[in-house]
Amino acid sequence: MLHLSPDLQTPLVSQIVDGLRGLIVGQVLKPGAKLPSIRAFAASHGVSVFTVVEAYDRLVAQGWLVSRANAGFFVKRRDDAAAPGAALPQRPRPRFDAAWYLKQIFENRNLPLKPGCGWLPHDWLFGDAVRRSLRQLSTDGPALDGYGLPQGHMALRMVVAESLAEHQLAVDADQVLLTQGSSQALDLAARCLVKPGDVVLVDDPGYPNLLFVLRAAGAHLLGVPRTPTGYDLPALEALLVRHRPRVFFTQPRLQSPTCSMASVAHLHRLLQLAAQHGLKRCTLELGGHAPVLVFDDADVDKAADACAAARFRNAGQVCVAPSRFFVQRGALARFTQRFIDVARAQRLGSGLAPETTMGPMANARRLDAMARFVNDARERGATVAAGGARLDGPGFYWQPTVLTGLGDDALAMNEETFGPVAPIVAFDTIEDALARANRLPYGLSAYAFTRSAATAHAVSIGLQAGMVGINGFGVSVAEAPFGGVKESGYGAEGGTEGLEGYLSPKFVAQVH
């Protein structure tokens, strides 16, 4: 079928891709034609089956072939106007609101299995193939500057639309919006569909990230029990009749965290119930920059120990973790040195190892983020007093890092670091400390260390945060509200306040 030469500079995979693409364009391979099996092609051309797998996969990704389960690979049927390589249509740039920016907080417990979190096993992610593709992409000369379309890369959206068309779903590329993952997609859907007080059905048990998003939106959540075969249909129908919900967020297949799969019969009945009761069918899924004020009269050593332990807990990947340390000038030197000592004493490693005191970052992107914070601080004249680099060896480990001598314009003082980076700066008066602590648009949690009751009262009133801890970091308890102010959220979980999202206030005025 093709003449391949291992002596050429062009890799064999690229020779196969280019050759088959030429046969398709030249109509030698007609639309719908079946290609030789992977093993047959490898045997007839004297190449590895892995080479053929990658070549076929590239052609599928580029839209030239389609893979059919238990049948093989076929030349894709398509209109000439939509052929790969055709000029992409020019689309007007839509307007997007800045509120669409999302913060996603992930926790990696370094366990081999992570049920319920939605992460695929590492060996499913084809890391080597992705790296090869990225190297190939870097040699193709794409434009690397400027911004892309808010909806996502047009070529990829066209591929998504074409893939849906293979399943008889007519969708234009302009109707496709690419997201960074399921959590962002679920958040966008919730913002579009749910208003405070709306009754919303969810799987019970359900996907935790989605439940938190819906609670933050003020939804009144009602659980639809999941069974090993799908849904408790009588319970679902009773909820529909009694509560007339706005929407049902559900995962029909491979549901998290139960892994149950709804049968076709269940899905058909679900659609019938949705039509009967006017339900919108949908399958769907804030943070802070917590200041700490340490006053001269505090127990400085205990404060430093507590602050460092809270900063490096879960490698700093905690929404309420202290992340900006304002220390009154008289206590600055002692506090900083004690903090540095604790940072250097951390033992990094697997969370399953008893000697470990700090684990890894969630992913490689967080390592890049830590480097960005540290490099920015250095460029602004700050001192890296401890850590400041990735740990050598495998894994996403970043050394516990202490930054001193920063100005308030440093990146680490303005963006949530969400990692083991601790900026420590000085203040002189309580008014100065409160002004600097409150200057950001975030207000999830804040903390202060002092022996003075008057100072504790003043900062608890003056700190703009949904939760304030005095001489400690225990701000999350079931009997108290958990939530933020300003751009760190609205509404609360926990305590009696957590019930407000489930209630619709009503005022009745009666005249006799």
Image: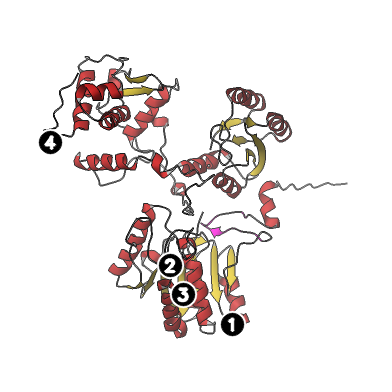
Image coordinates of residue 496 in percent, x first then y, are 71, 56
Split into 4 quadrants, where in the image is the N terminus? top left
Which kind of residue does numbered mark 4 sit on?
Gln
Residue tagged by mark 3? 326
Q: CA distance from mark 1 to mark 3?
A: 16 Å
Q: Position of residue 186 (x, y in %)?
A: 51, 41
Query: Which region is colored magenta?
Result: 480-492
Q: Earlier in the sequence, mark 1 or mark 3?
A: 3
Percent x, y of residue 451? 59, 82
In-front residue for pair 307/329: 307
Count residues near mark 4 (Cα–Cα under 10 Å), then give few for <14, some for 14-19, many for 20+.
few
The answer to the question of whether label 2 and label 1 lie on touching residues, with beta carbons closer than 8 A, is no
Tell me: 232 left or right of 354.
Answer: right
Distance of label 2 from label 4 (alpha carbons)? 47 Å
- Left of 211 or right of it: where is 72? left
Vertical arrangement, residue 133 with respect to residue 308, above or below: above
Which amino acid type is shown beneath numbered disc 3?
Answer: Phe
Q: Quickly name the residue at label 4.
A: 9
Q: Nearer the viewer, mark 2 or mark 4?
A: 2
Give the CA distance from mark 4 to mark 3: 59 Å
